[in-house]
Amino acid sequence: MSYPVFAVTVDLVVLTVRQGELHVLLVRRGCEPHLGQWALPGGFVHADEDLSTAARRELTEETGLAGPGGHLEQLASYGTPDRDPRGRVVTVAYLALLPDLPAPTAGTDAAAAAWRPVGRHGLAFDHDRILADGVERARSKLEYTPLATAFCPPEFTIAALRTVYEAVWGESIDPRNFHRKATTAPGFVEPTGRSTEGEPGRPAKLYRRGDAALLNPPILRRRPEG
Amino acid sequence: MSYPVFAVTVDLVVLTVRQGELHVLLVRRGCEPHLGQWALPGGFVHADEDLSTAARRELTEETGLAGPGGHLEQLASYGTPDRDPRGRVVTVAYLALLPDLPAPTAGTDAAAAAWRPVGRHGLAFDHDRILADGVERARSKLEYTPLATAFCPPEFTIAALRTVYEAVWGESIDPRNFHRKATTAPGFVEPTGRSTEGEPGRPAKLYRRGDAALLNPPILRRRPEG
DNA sequence: TCCATTTCTCGTCATTTTGACGATAACAGT
DNA sequence: ACTGTTATCGTCAAAATGACGAGAAATGGA
């Protein structure tokens, strides 16, 4: 039996929250096709490599970002026949959520890497679509899982957590109701006993992520009417 | 530049509800590897074919199931290096939800096709894992989307819809509270004006699926304590 | 025909959750 | 000491939930 031949890549939608806004990590392509255009970081899966391993490798290799914390999950696969001029390429997209870290370093294949506010960018390949899918996945996962903590450093305030929700959802949230829901939901956050110091306003208690895998009850965003 | 060569397949997790139990469509493999073993239906993606097109093709071609209604969405991709003895194969799994239809017919590559209650089956390749992922996806999607209607024929009763939830979740639901939630959630179901006839008990009103994409408020299953 | 049985549908009611907002606590800076 | 800022706790009406009771409307058997 014979069958068509494919190349397989992984592409990364790496999201973080900086200054209250949702940002995505983009690289300027250093080789053809789409040389010089902005794109999601990614690359070919090696001959004897698992998909998730490849995703993790690309994340550290091409962007210099690693560190503990954060979150990496598979997003979806894209394989339209003409999505890559080099031939038949299927890409497995991964979604990474990271705390706000120092600026990324350009990798081997990328001429530059930078955080950009999410939006329509005119990215290479079908990466605009992949980015949109990744953002939507992040938005809905904040409702039902404690994943917002992946955007935060190991210790964080409830206000910082709220800022994550506001940035990802693009809507403002009542601080008092959010405080109640975040501290009430079992396993979402755990108090550390410490507090912030030196910041303006009343000091805030510090929390770390809890051990729940699911948020119960969920924290639902405002639905459009209907 | 050179890069590793892959084959790409699609595999299908086809679910339906028969006699109050969740069933999955399995085929007995008609060729190597794993000849004679039960597996998910699937096959190679053609040279100039989109992934979703391939999934739809396999669904009709290999199982004889088609028809309107139902639902097909991408589930996830699996590409562990040693998952297929023939070489490096990445499979893109799709999840299909169908109303209870007549028995499937065996296709070209499959010696037989049959509905089996979901559970541990000792399937070929990593199909047990893919099946488990598909079932979990279906379970959680029933909470937040009107997808339960995909398991129903074009016209259905609230009780039939409840049976779907009970089968997929594996827990019983209070008929009166469910009736209230199903008929209250905007865009979930629409009355047709008709009713059932000839069945025991009081006739039930018939409904068709509404036009909502999301269930608001969601219908949440009972969470395990914690 | 009459009755028991089945199933659908609507109502009730206490409890919980939500959303909107008032008020106080605890800091930094001037 | 005063002002501004932010965190946290409380209140209260509205909405949603969960646990039931009970009537409506059919079938099937005595």
Image (cartoon, coloured by chain):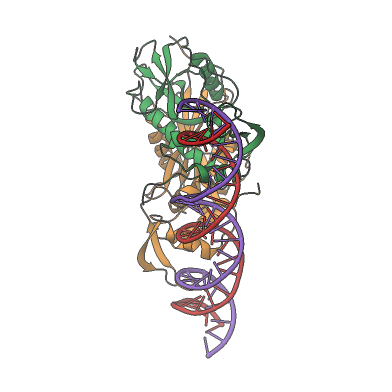
Chain colours: A orange, B green, C red, D purple
Residue at image location 35% in from the left, 22% down from the top: B123
**Across the whole image, how many numbered discs are drawn on residues?**
0
Query: Residue drawn 66% across and 49% down?
Result: A225
Residue B190 vertical position relative to residue B226 in the rendered view, above or below: above
Visible residue check, residue B51: yes
Q: Position of residue D6 (x, y in %)?
A: 51, 69
Using the image as rendered, state which of residue A114 and residue A56 is in the foreground. Answer: A56
Q: Horizontal and vertical percent for residue B181? A: 55, 45
Q: Residue furthest right?
A: B193
Q: Nearer the viewer, residue B189 or A205?
A: B189
Q: Does residue A214 appear to the left or right of C13 in the view shown?
A: left
**On screen, A219 above or below A89?**
below
Q: Position of residue A147 (x, y in %)?
A: 45, 49
> Residue at image x 56%, y 52%?
A221
Residue B4 position, x and y percent, is: 42, 23
Q: Is residue A75 among the parts visible in the rendering? A: no
